[in-house]
Structure formats: C-alpha cells, structure tokens
Amino acid sequence: MRPILFGTIWFVIGMFGWLTFSCIGGTGEAVTGQKDPFLHALMYLFGVLFFFSMPVAITIEIVAWIKRRG
C-alpha cells in the first residue's frame, strides 16, 4: 500500500480523535471548571497525529518517487 494512503487514513483518524476529545474536554471544562489532564493529553496526541501525518506521508512518497526515477 502507498504511503499517501496510510497518511490519509491516519489524518482522518487524527481529525476525528482531535475533534472528539476537544469537544468532550471543552464541555467538561465548561461544566466543572477543571481540565482533565488525560483528555487534554489525548487531544494533543490526536492533534499531533492530525497535523503531521500528511506532511510525513507526502515526504515519504516524494523520496520513494525520487528513488524509483534514479
């Protein structure tokens, strides 16, 4: 399977996880006035996955393309 496909899959997983935990954490903070560190950590984990999965996959795809051409 191509790296760009894996990158797209991880991008979608990261996006849904980030949105889910952001909404849950924001609602919980609005109701209780306190941040749950576990939800905050999950939000950052999925956010990093969301923001960096596509650039890494594109870079790997470009390197593989250069190796095939050379």
Image: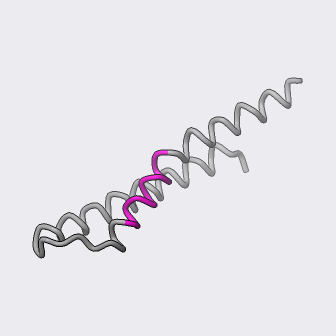
Q: Position of residue 10 (x, y in %)?
A: 54, 54
- x 70%, y 39%: residue: 60
Task: List the single residue furthest toward the right.
Answer: 70
Q: Position of residue 18 (x, y in %)?
A: 37, 58
Q: Position of residue 59 (x, y in %)?
A: 66, 35
Is 48 a magenta residue?
Answer: yes
Which image quadrant is residue 16 in? bottom left
Q: On screen, 38 above or below 22?
A: below
- Residue range in magenta is 41-51
Q: On screen, 35 above or below 57?
A: below
Q: On screen, 61 above or below 45?
A: above
Q: Toward the viewer: 40 or 16?
A: 40
Which image quadrant is residue 39 in? bottom left
Q: Main secondary structure of the magenta part?
A: helix
**Left-right relation of 19 to 67:** left
Q: How many marks?
A: 0
**Left-right relation of 31 to 46:** left
- x 52%, y 45%: residue: 52
Quarter occupied by the C terminus: top right
**Left-right relation of 60 to 45:** right
- x 36%, y 74%: residue: 38
Q: Position of residue 69 (x, y in %)?
A: 85, 24
- x 80%, y 27%: residue: 66
Task: Identify the coloring.
Answer: one colour
Task: List the single residue furthest toward the top.
Answer: 70
